Image: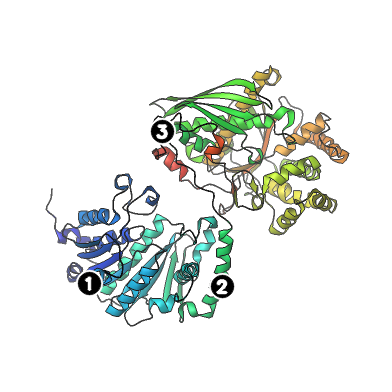
Amino acid sequence: MPRFSYDLAFDRNIGWLTDWEQQALRFKRVAIAGMGGVGGVHLLTLARFGIGAFSISDFDRFDIVNFNRQIGANVATIDRPKAEVLEEMARSINPEVSIRRFDQGIDDSNIDAFLEGVDVFVDGFDYFVLDVRRKVYARCAELGIPALCAAPIGMGVGFLAFLPGGMSFERYFRFEGRPELEQYLRFLVGLVPRALHRAYLVDPSRIDFAAKRTASTGASCQLCAGVAAVNAVKLMLGRSGVPAIPYHHHYDPYVGKLAVTKLRWGNAGPLQRLKIALGKRGIAALARQKPPPSEPPPSSPIEEILRAARWAPSGDNVQPWRFEILDANSLRVRLDADHGENVYEYRGGEPTLIAGGVLLESLRVAATGWGRAMTWSYEGLQGSPGRHVMRVDFHPDASVTPDRWLPHLMQRSVDRRRYRARPLTARERQSLADAAGTDIRLEWHQSRGSGLRLALLGARATDIRLRTPEAYEVHRRMLDFARKHSPDGIPGGAVGLDRATLAIMRWGMARWSRLRLLNRLGGSWSTAAQLDLLPGLASGAFFTMRLADPAGEAAAAPDQRVTALLRVGEAVQRFWLEASSVGLVMQPGLAILAFAHYGETNAVFSADPTVVRKARSLAARFRQVLGDGPGEFVFIGRIGEPLPRLPVMRSTRRRLDQLVEGDRRTYSPHATHEPVVSPAMSALRSRTSRPHD
């Protein structure tokens, strides 16, 4: 092993530092409180500057929940003391470094020992540790020690420097005499007065001051370390230009902005007081938006497969499947064949069978992340009301590699809003057709005229469904106005209506009499214009899918027809995943097919004769637009390139323990809920979803 040399180890700093400045840093000491998200990376960044001595503190141990942001957290360090791990990492950079460790944290009894001989204090405390933080800052002020706070906020950094003789920490934040929750709020408002991060906070329910929980990213911790280290070095070397409080800097690379704010009176200023007052209301609103309870971690590969595959789409997000795990490599899928009075489940629930095929393809793709091939067989219709039953077997195979669609299982989504109007390229259409395969006949409708005609068909179908009393309960149950992320419905804000129309719709959906009144006033057509006509015109293309062999499987025995529709669902999911992989999104048009079918077969699906007549008119127009070519229509939708937007709202999925029937642990070879690690599946779960599924 080469002998360590301080001069060689930190030689590349020279140029930005002089030789004598580098040697000066060798004999400086920095105190860092906390070795977690920011504290650990503070230590290592300053160690690479060649700082020769540190005082560090932390009483906590690493856990798996630290992996996303804490530089010392990995599989090998789980349950190890954070300060011990970070000392080892710092010594692996500079074996000569002097480190004083405070393994019980900082309290009244050891603050002075912690700050003894310190040139700069760097704040690495957890956000919610305010009492001891205030004491350390106060003691730094008394001892004339500069105190730096680089706070990870969103994907950026808020930086504050409290220098000797300047405004104090307490005078800036004004904590004294305030309730605990208000202190947390005051800390946030003082850290980031311009709140640049609010532009991309997609799930506010994850911020819970009462539960002392907030969201954080590793990228922001890295930014904090860079900002704090540079300013600490400037202070230790006597260079000028460190911006002291009341100046505050907030840099956020996500929005590409740097905000420099001067708060002459700190949080006592009139604008800050207004922000705090508004923030109190925000805290109360957040308290009403609790995130769903976390579910037990998967205990085997088959659970990991199910957790990914359950993101398969289904009409109204009903998730009509339930799983019975038979052993470590096999399960039964039970698919509800009857959803009661759901008017969209025409011809004995065939849309659900297509959704079942989508699930089967999702299971196949997910299984590849665990080195498994998948086969399935149809076992028939069982029980009353009936459930279609499929057996699924996973086959460990060393030759199976993660499918290229694997990352898109959760990224794929329904997007009901407008897309870019550019036509799909020939290459995109070909890749989608190749993905769909030969079980369906894919037809494109890409001209502006055909797009308008199909958008009008969608508008007609929406007019019918809003006027159909039998569909009212379906819509009322499906639309979730209370949550931005709905595990068993569709968030109201995700359906594609503007705020005013959405508010009116929410009022109308409370009672059928209200909705009927709105329809009489033209509400159904104005809603249809927003939901179908305008988005339909802003699309890359419409497409239809027909059974490829109408004279064979479509007219065959019941079990063969079920199998054919399951194969259609597999083709739909391959098409959808391929669309996601090439940057496209889509929206199915189930209502068009449902009401056209009722109209074509003269079915009396509603007690309202007006909507029955409208369905017959829709069926006639459907044939005029799409013709009478060979093959039964089984799927229709629009597709295109999405406009840039945040994933603020979307349908999520039920917990796995709500979808698995029986005891999940009986099949597990380890009978434990310890995390099961797979690089492919871990990467899959970390992907960011698109909105509006």
Residue 159 in view (yes/no): yes
**Residue drawn 50% across the image and 38% down it:** 307
Along the polypeptide, which appears first: circle 1 or circle 3?
1
Q: How is the image coloured?
A: rainbow
- Place of residue 629 in the rendered image (x, y in percent of width and height, measured from the top left): 74, 27
The local secondary structure at tag 2 comes to helix
Crowd band around label 1 with a 10 angstrom C-alpha radius: few (<14), some (14–19), many (20+): few
Direction from residue 437 to residue 158 in the image, left or right = left
Instruction: Kindly indicate whether the residue at mark 3 contacts the one at mark 2 (C-beta within 8 angstroms).
Output: no
Amino acid at the residue labelled 2: Ala
Foreground label between 2 and 3: 3
- Place of residue 314 in the rendered image (x, y in percent of width and height, measured from the top left): 63, 37
Quadrant into which the C terminus falls? top right
Numbered mark located on residue 116 in the image: 1
Compared with residue 502, is residue 322 higher up or lower down, i.e. above or below?
above
Q: CA distance from mark 1 to mark 3?
A: 51 Å
Direction from residue 247 to residue 410 in the image, left or right = right
Compared with residue 113, is residue 434 higher up or lower down, i.e. above or below?
above
Instruction: Kindly indicate whether the residue at mark 3 contacts the one at mark 1 (C-beta within 8 angstroms).
Output: no
**Residue drawn 75% across the image and 48% down it:** 528
Which residue carries the number 2 mark? 277
Amino acid at the residue labelled 1: Glu
The local secondary structure at tag 1 comes to loop
Q: CA distance from mark 2 to mark 3?
A: 50 Å
Which residue carries the number 3 mark? 671
- Place of residue 606 in the rendered image (x, y in percent of width and height, measured from the top left): 83, 37
When asked about the image quadrant of residue 242, the answer is: bottom left
The local secondary structure at tag 3 comes to loop
Along the polypeptide, which appears first: circle 2 or circle 3?
2
Q: Residue furthest toward the left?
A: 3
